[in-house]
Amino acid sequence: MVNNGEVTTPSPAEPVTVGKRGGRSPRDMALSLGILLVPIALLLLFYRFVLDGDKPVSIDAEPTIQQARAAAVFEVAAPQGLGDDWHPVNATFKRDADGATLRLGYVDPEQDPVQLIESSIPTATLLPAELGAEPEAVGTFRDGARTWQRYDARPGENALLLLEKGRTIIVVGTTDSKSLEKMATALR
């Protein structure tokens, strides 16, 4: 250092010593983490149980159903009386050169996806697009006067198919057959 023209060397500082409690022990680190994790855990519990954070976000499918009915391309069937544990999560209506398609997506009571597809597109075009290249018919399901065909669709998916004049109805999902049957039975 330069002080009034004289060069002086600083005196060596005394070494800093850490006392017995000056360092951090693993116990101190665990307590610090615990203090941070407790509020995070409380927020997650609040989100899950008070705000129903795991519950699917339901939409109102009725405007899309009305749009499909107004188009009058085919007779539209909508699910009736499924219960509060079924959640509509998406709804679309689309017209193509081949016809029109209504899609309604639901989450069933076991939190599995179920999709309802109603279409006027020819079945030979619709089936491979919706059920995979080679869907396999494996049986039937009778719902009053209607007889549905059961299909093994894409890997892990089951489907029910109803062929009617002017439309094809498909109920497909990764859920068990009972949920698909409940959806099919609810169609009015």
Image (cartoon, rainbow, N blue to C red):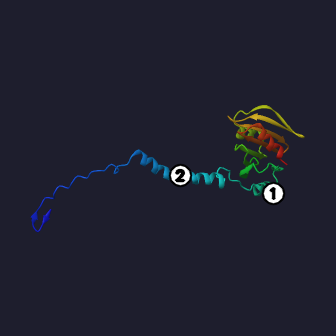
Q: In this view, does 58 lie above or below 181?
A: below
Q: In this view, does 127 lie above or below 104?
A: above
Position in image of residue 35 (x %, y %): 49, 52
Secondary structure category for the residue under label 2? helix
Residue in the picture at 76% in, 45% down: 117
**Residue 22 shows which numbered tag?**
none
Position in image of residue 72 (x %, y %): 82, 54
Give the foreground label among 1 and 2. Answer: 2
Kind of residue sitting beneath label 2:
Val
Query: Where is mark 1, residue-wise?
Result: 70
**Residue 38 shows which numbered tag?**
2
Q: Which residue lies furthest to the front in this view?
A: 20
Q: Residues within 10 Å of mark 2 (few under 14, many from 20)?
A: few
Secondary structure category for the residue under label 1? helix
Position in image of residue 178 (x %, y %): 78, 38
Q: Residues within 10 Å of mark 1 (few under 14, many from 20)?
A: few
Position in image of residue 82 (x %, y %): 80, 48
Please give left or right for residue 81 compared with residue 25 in the image: right
Residue in the picture at 79% in, 57% down: 66
Q: Which of marks 1 and 2 is nearer the N terminus?
A: 2
Question: Within the image, what quadrant is residue 135 found in?
Answer: top right
Residue in the picture at 70% in, 40% down: 129
Kind of residue sitting beneath label 1:
Ala
Q: Which residue lies furthest to the left in this view?
A: 6
